[in-house]
Image (cartoon, rainbow, N blue to C red):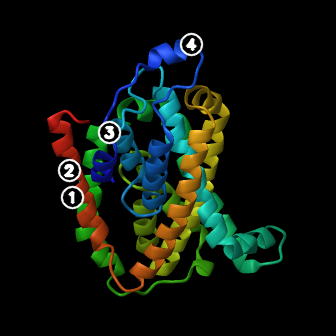
Amino acid sequence: MAALAVAVLVPTRVLATTAADAGQPIDELTPAKAVLLGLVEGITEFLPISSTGHLLVAQRLMDIGTTEATKAAADAYAISIQSGAILAVLLLYWRRLWSMVRGLFGRDVAGRRVLIGLVLSVLPAVVVALAFEDAIKDNLLEVGPVIGAWIVGGLVILFVTPKLTGSRGGVPLEQLSAGQAIVIGVVQCLALWPGTSRSLVTILAALAVGLSLAAAVEFSFLLGFVTLGGATLFEMATEGSTMVDTFGLLDPLIGLVVAFVSAAVAIKWMVGYLQRHSLAIFGWYRLAVAALALVLLASGAL
């Protein structure tokens, strides 16, 4: 994604402060950039390669959020664009989600079990995120920490994951226990470090507690639906007006629509791919994109 950003858009810094003082939307975010960011978000959100890290690098390459006047808006957009990926899960897994709704009213035992598991898995990340939100944004939302997380995650996929997926066994999602859900939720807190990948840590945690690979991947998608949905609503409530005032409404909406379409395609591809292959390709990709980011950082492009 970083290479794609370099090829498509040459960084062109904007005099954002002048535009902000004039009360006009700042043109750091153009329709073309919105499309590219939508592709980055949609493709990377549910793959174990970290959408936050890719969005951070892409925004830097395209000079989005590089000034004090636009940083808060860019950070808010990086979260709110996740709405597109959330809608993709809603479209592709509506039967499972409907099963959970029925379970809420005591009409579906399996749906109720999965729903309880999701709630238990979400709570730890909510507590940690609220407690350390400012510290994370101030210290970890930078290219350096993201590169480090990419490298560590890549090595984990290559050397740890094979031990968890070798038998391709495990229990189905309908047999998820409360204890398993809590463990997955605690491990998900690691994904608050940008670049780690929520998808990666939840899939690995689910495998480690005994879920099958198919169940681990599906639960990761469902957990992302709930976690990202909550984070997006919170960010829009607190910083949504800042984002709209800075970038307008049309360009963010373009990115959201593109994210929706590309996320749906990426999810379908990943589910099919993992039925025949291991996660190794994602480990090698993380190491490659980390190396590319290091080169860009050393050259001053980031």
Of mark 4 and mark 3, the one earlier in the sequence is: 4
Count residues near mark 2 (Cα–Cα under 10 Å), then give few for <14, some for 14-19, many for 20+: some
Label 4 – label 3 distance at C-alpha: 26 Å
* Location of residue 201 by image quarter: bottom left
Label 4 – label 2 distance at C-alpha: 38 Å
Residue type, label 4: Ala
- In this picture, residue 96 sits left or right of residue 261: right
- Is residue 148 shown above or below 286? above
Q: Are marks 1 and 2 in contact (CB under 8 Å)?
A: yes
x, y (%) of residue 84? Answer: 59, 55
For the N terminus, give its image quadrant.
Answer: bottom left
Using the image as rendered, state which of residue 256 and residue 284 is in the foreground.
256
Dot 1 corresponds to which residue?
288
Dot 4 corresponds to which residue?
22
Label 4 element class: loop
Dot 2 corresponds to which residue?
292
